[in-house]
Image (spheres, helix red, strand yellow):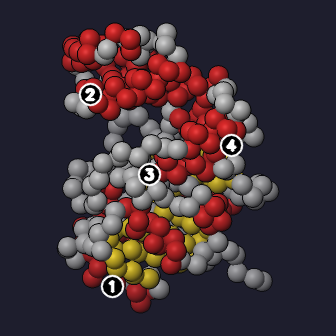
Amino acid sequence: MSAPPLVSILMPAYNAERWLAESIASAAGQTYPNVEVVVVDDGSEDGSVEVARSFEERGVRVIEQENKGACAARNAALEESNGDYIKFLDADDVLLPGAVAAQFAALEGEPDDVVPFGMAVRCDAALRPLAGRPPSTDPEGRVGSENLGERLAWLLERNIQTSRPLHARRLLERVGGFDTRLDGGQEYDLHMRMVVDGVRFKFVPEVGVLNRDHASPHRITNSKSRGNEYTRDWWDEVLRLFDGEYPPPVQDAWIRSLWKSVVRDTIRGNPSSAKEKAERALELDPTLDFVESDVRKKLYSVMHPATVEKNIFYFKNKLPSRLRP
């Protein structure tokens, strides 16, 4: 009997000495029978390289590079790997033993453009589950719809974290991997470009990964800081696909996402970013009020209502009159 397709588990690491051994062990300990593990150290200054190399006798490959950021490290791992399928794993997260097997099984009978993604549990540093909004799920199959507008509308207001999907290599390479210009939201950008390129995501209702949520400055996503001055140009491609006019589900979802970002950026003290997003939202619909009730409810759940209203009032009055909803 021939071996099943090789799955490469790719791990970028930056000053991850504290977590790395547990993460590598979880990748190497998958029940799926044909896995390789590739670790790219992104210029760590602690003992991360030594920790990673202690697993080389178990077949783990370790690559060292100067500090270039999370996207560059993931792309380097992709280039050096051999698998037909790719699973990304951050160096502070843990894969459950059956994660790869469950997602690979979900591909049976599916078209070649389907990417399965499993459940994730947000945890503290000790891997104790945290309360709060759970990771996005899709029991209705919207992000797997054959309708591009439906897929985009779902993804616009949700995020599939980097470690959740099992990608076919060719689908990643077809869109060029991660955008190395970005220091935040890289997986959101990647998955959007993949959807525009024709990919459909399939939700697998099994927990596959434990995501550590901690404030360490040494997380891989914080390893290279640069301004996100780059515009996601896949929107031009979306417009082309829809003959210059967004379908209602896409436009409505995008507007809601933009206005939520407006309020969030204002509260975080980034009025220039808030103003830019407000202008984009108002171009799509000049009549929509960005302080609609669902936005307020979400903000109220994380901060005092008086603070919410103060910042909303401040922003509305700072907007030029032509931009006020």
- The residue beneath circle 2 is 271
| Label 4–label 3 contact, CB within 8 A | no
Number of numbered labels in the structure image:
4
Q: Position of residue 213 (x, y in %)?
A: 31, 49
Disc 4/disc 3 C-alpha distance (Å): 21 Å
Instruction: Left or right? Give the position of 79 relative to 196.
Output: left
Q: Residues within 10 Å of mark 1 (few under 14, many from 20)?
A: few
Disc 4/disc 2 C-alpha distance (Å): 36 Å
Disc with the residue nearer the chain's start (3 vs 2): 3
Disc 3/disc 1 C-alpha distance (Å): 30 Å
Residue at 60% over, 57% down: 175
Q: Position of residue 70 (x, y in %)?
A: 37, 61
In terms of depth relative to the viewer, which is nearer, 224 or 320? 320
Residue type at tag 2: Pro
- The residue beneath circle 1 is 54
Disc with the residue nearer the chain's start (2 vs 1): 1
Disc 3/disc 2 C-alpha distance (Å): 22 Å
Disc with the residue nearer the chain's start (4 vs 2): 4
Mark 2 element type: helix
Q: Position of residue 191 (x, y in %)?
A: 55, 49
Q: Residues within 10 Å of mark 4 (few under 14, many from 20)?
A: many
Q: Residues within 10 Å of mark 3 (few under 14, many from 20)?
A: many
Residue at 49% over, 13% down: 286
- The residue beneath circle 4 is 144
- The residue beneath circle 3 is 186
